[in-house]
Image (tube, rainbow, N blue to C red):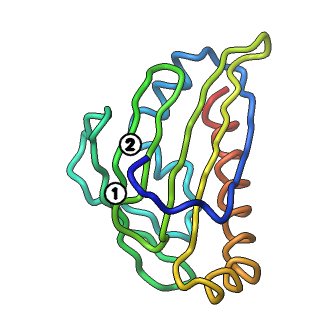
């Protein structure tokens, strides 16, 4: 793990889609698909020239808006294990720690996707208050949207 910070929070989501494992991993291995599964209210835009060659060490710069405030974010692919898993970590951005594990597992019903996000906000007690009042709910809405979009796009 790149950052020695212990996560304050873990967000975990599982979704099964009726698609083969290679097809699902291929979808997630294309950075441009991030825009399709990110809620429009975040005004998400990839700034890294495309196509982006995904793999360990690849970086993706993007901009988004959270509650009207523009944010720049830089992630790096920390681990790349096709077609079963990849991990992206925030190098620069709003979190003290953001580590997103994407896992894919073939089942009799299709492919189960598991997202595990370990994260910590800056500013100690103030960050924990903001998490309780706003960030936790925002992340739930973002991942709810993501699940709906993935189910629509991967039929």
Name the residue furthest left: 49
Q: Secondary structure at mark 2?
A: loop
Toward the viewer: 43 or 63?
Answer: 63
Rendering coords of residue 70 (x, y %): 41, 80
Which of the 4 image quadrants contains residue 144?
Answer: bottom right
**Label 2: how many Cα within 10 Å (few below 14, some 14–19, many 20+):** some
Question: Does residue 107 lie above or below 80 as drawn?
Answer: above
Image marks 2 and 1: residues in contact by CB distance under 8 Å: yes
Which of the 4 image quadrants contains residue 48?
Answer: bottom left
Question: Does residue 115 lie above or below 67 as drawn?
Answer: above
Horizontal relation, residue 115 to residue 109: left or right: left
Which of the 4 image quadrants contains residue 138?
Answer: bottom right
**Residue located beneath label 2 in the image:** 31
Q: How many marks?
A: 2
Name the residue furthest bottom: 126
Q: Which mark is residue 110?
A: none
Q: Quadrant of the C terminus?
A: top right
Rendering coords of residue 44 (x, y %): 44, 64
The structure residue drawn at horizontal position 68% and vertical position 21%, both measured from the top left corner, is 111
Q: Secondary structure at mark 1?
A: strand
The structure residue drawn at horizontal position 51% and vertical position 25%, both measured from the top left corner, is 25
Rendering coords of residue 71 (x, y %): 40, 76
The structure residue drawn at horizontal position 59% and vertical position 17%, both measured from the top left corner, is 21
Horizontal relation, residue 113 to residue 26: left or right: right
Rendering coords of residue 140 (x, y %): 73, 62
The structure residue drawn at horizontal position 38% and vertical position 62%, both measured from the top left corner, is 45
Question: Does residue 143 lie above or below 130 as drawn?
Answer: above
Q: CA distance from mark 2 to mark 1?
A: 8 Å
**Residue located beneath label 1 in the image:** 46
């Amino acid at each position: 793990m790149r950052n020695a910070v212990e996560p304050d929070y873990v967000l975990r989501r599982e979704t099964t889609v009726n698609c083969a494992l290679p097809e699902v991993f291929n979808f997630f291995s294309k950075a441009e698909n991030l825009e399709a599964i990110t809620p429009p209210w975040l005004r998400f835009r990839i700034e890294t020239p495309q196509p982006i060659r995904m793999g360990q060490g690849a970086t993706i710069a993007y901009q988004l808006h959270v509650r009207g405030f523009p944010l720049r974010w830089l992630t790096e692919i920390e681990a790349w294990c096709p077609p079963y898993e990849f991990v992206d970590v925030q190098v620069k951005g709003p979190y003290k720690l953001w580590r997103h594990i994407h896992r894919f597992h073939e089942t009799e019903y299709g492919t189960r996707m598991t997202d595990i996000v370990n994260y910590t906000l800056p500013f100690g007690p103030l960050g924990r208050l903001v998490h309780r009042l706003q960030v936790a709910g925002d992340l739930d809405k973002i991942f709810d949207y993501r699940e709906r979009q993935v189910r629509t796009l991967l039929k």
